[in-house]
Image (spheres, rainbow, N blue to C red):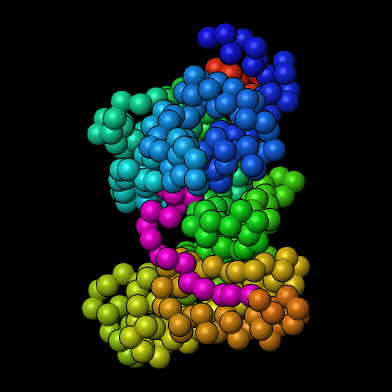
Amino acid sequence: MASESTLRFGAQTDEVTSLLRIVNMVRDGHASTRPEIGRITGLGRGVVTQRVDQAIEMGYLEDGAFGPSSGGRAPRTLRFRADRGRIITCALGGLHIHVGVSMLEGDVLEDSHAEWDISRGPAETLDRAHAMIDELLAKTPDVPVWGISVGIPGPVDFESGRPVAPPIMPGWNGFDIRRRFEEKYDAPVWVDNDVNLLALNERSRRGDEHTDLIYCKVGSGIGAGLVSHGRIHRGANGAAGDIGHVRVASSEAACRCGKVGCLEAVAGGWALVRDAELAIAEGATGLLAQRYRDGEPMTPTLIARSAENGDALAISLVQGCARVVGESIAALVNMFNPGAIVIGGAVVSAGEVFLAEVRQRVYELSLPLATRDLSIVQSQNDRREPLRGGAEMVREQLFDATFPRWFADGHPTIDAVQGTP
Ligand SMILES: [Zn+2]
């Protein structure tokens, strides 16, 4: 195509910039007709027509139905071609694998979930994940894979896609997760911390591109994802938001990371399980104690459910956790001034028992200006959240971060996305 050769990256910067902007404008719903594009960009009618024609020719946009008329001839609407590529999302948890397939608009078409112990190591775990993904790909239309996201429950060096000393993932330190997926699916891959993906899902759900929010997950471990002005704040090495291993004053509890007194060792789900079992061994009674003595395994979810049902031991454990988590969140609120704090994870499923305590601590310990418009809410608690967040991350990387590098090819490739010729 003639337009491709003239549109090579770097050749005609203004032309390329406006073309990519127009594609993204239609993609994110800011404009859906040529006149609208003209109004927003200030480009003349002839230029808009030319750019839109190029975008259609390259397969990024297509003509839709006629839109509402504002007097004259009704303008033709434009649509982003979300059917051109697929996104694979893989969310690894401490005890599960969850995979999904989305089209380019991000909705999860198919997903599958399996219980799995991540400490079995990267080779076995990724083989299993790949087998689950292959099953899904076989079920959905035969469309090329444009991007892959992998979420893991530990710190990730986002640039290299490798885990960095993840406390609950023995054998994974420095493992090249990205390459394993690239080799298998021949598509660009991004690896991120699972809580960052949850934060991204929350951002896209709210539809506010300038949002400032913190997603705090209190599951077996504790972590936070920070969205600053619509962007994930990963920090210099990708460690931002890893609040689970910040020391909590006055505690000497041993943590699974090897240190003592970490937030997680006091208030993480695994610490609550430890404390519940100890209390029951020392003679505690009630619903939770009864169920445990009847042979049910002690889990953060069981503790949260029992608290919801009024069990005194469970309530005191959940409230104790919420108090300490609330103190850590208050510190973040003072530094970061988010508009919303969204809290998810197994322990938080106790609902108001947990949230009321967090709110109280945060308002007590934060500056009035920082909490003036702050909302503290529970996450939707939907199992697909990490998959939607993963698809959102791929969309952001493809169309915001790397689009100029690959658009001329008509589809993303590993080399173009990574900027290697
Ligand atoms: Zn720790």
Percent x, y for residue 157? 64, 41
Question: Can residue 69 be seen by looking at this rendering?
Answer: yes
Residue pictured at 72% horizontal, 50% vertical: 235
Identify the image quadrant of residue 368.
bottom right
6 left or right of 180 in image: right
Residue at far front of view: 71
Q: Is residue 383 magenta?
A: yes
Against 407, residue 216 (above or below) is below
Residue pictured at 64% horizontal, 26% vertical: 47
Residue pictured at 59% horizontal, 75% vertical: 375
Q: Is residue 173 magenta?
A: no
377 left or right of 305 in image: right
Percent x, y for residue 143? 35, 26
- In this view of the protein, which residue sits in the foreground, 9 or 147? 9
The C terminus appears in which quarter of the rendering?
A: top right
Residue pictured at 49% horizontal, 40% vertical: 72
